Amino acid sequence: MPRAKFQTLTEQMFYILLCLYQECCGMDIMEKVTRMTDGRVSVGPGTLYNLLENFLEAGMIRETKAEGRKRSYVITEAGKKALWDEQQRLLTLTSDYEHFAGQGGDSL
């Protein structure tokens, strides 16, 4: 069965939402994601603005100001919940790995 939209987040989605705990514009988000991940994750403008639009439609972020074409955003409670849920999902995966792989996979 297909997963509901935003039931799981890609790395790019995760880091974009994480950046928006502080108000940011698109260029700031791209720079922060690269800095936060030491260059391991990057977000291009096409991906970023598509995801921002999807997050806006889903109520996960809100626009805080617009100055010409420059728009700033901040995370909402719905976005914080999605980020929290993803963090919990990742912790569960890590725990499962440690439990089963730590035992040489014999527990399966």
Image (cartoon, helix red, strand yellow):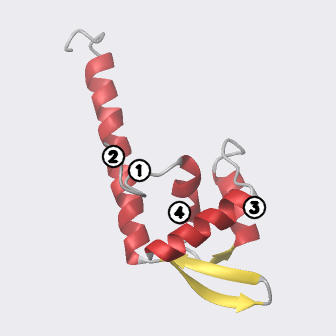
* Residue identifier under label 3: 45
Q: Secondary structure at mark 4?
A: helix
Total number of numbered discs in the rendering? 4
Q: Quadrant of the C terminus?
A: top left
* Residue identifier under label 1: 8
Q: Residue type at mark 3? A: Pro
Of labels 1 and 4, the one closer to you:
1
User: Going 38% across and 72% down the picture, which residue do you hit?
Assistant: 78
Q: Secondary structure at mark 2?
A: helix
* Residue identifier under label 2: 89
**What separation in Å lies between label 1 and label 4 (alpha carbons)?**
14 Å
Q: Which is nearer the eye, 101 or 1?
A: 1
Badge 3: how crowded within 10 Å, few (<14), some, or many (20+)? Answer: few
**What separation in Å lies between label 1 and label 2 (alpha carbons)?**
8 Å
Q: Residue type at mark 1? A: Thr
Res 48 → quadrant: bottom right
**Above-or-below relation of 51 to 53:** above
Badge 1: how crowded within 10 Å, few (<14), some, or many (20+)? Answer: some
> Which of the two discs, 1 and 4, labels the residue nearer the N terminus?
1
Is there CB contact under 8 Å for labels 2 and 4?
no
Is there CB contact under 8 Å for labels 1 and 2?
yes
Q: Secondary structure at mark 3?
A: helix
> Which of the two discs, 4 and 3, labels the residue nearer the N terminus?
4
Res 70 → quadrant: bottom right
**What separation in Å lies between label 2 and label 4 (alpha carbons)?**
16 Å
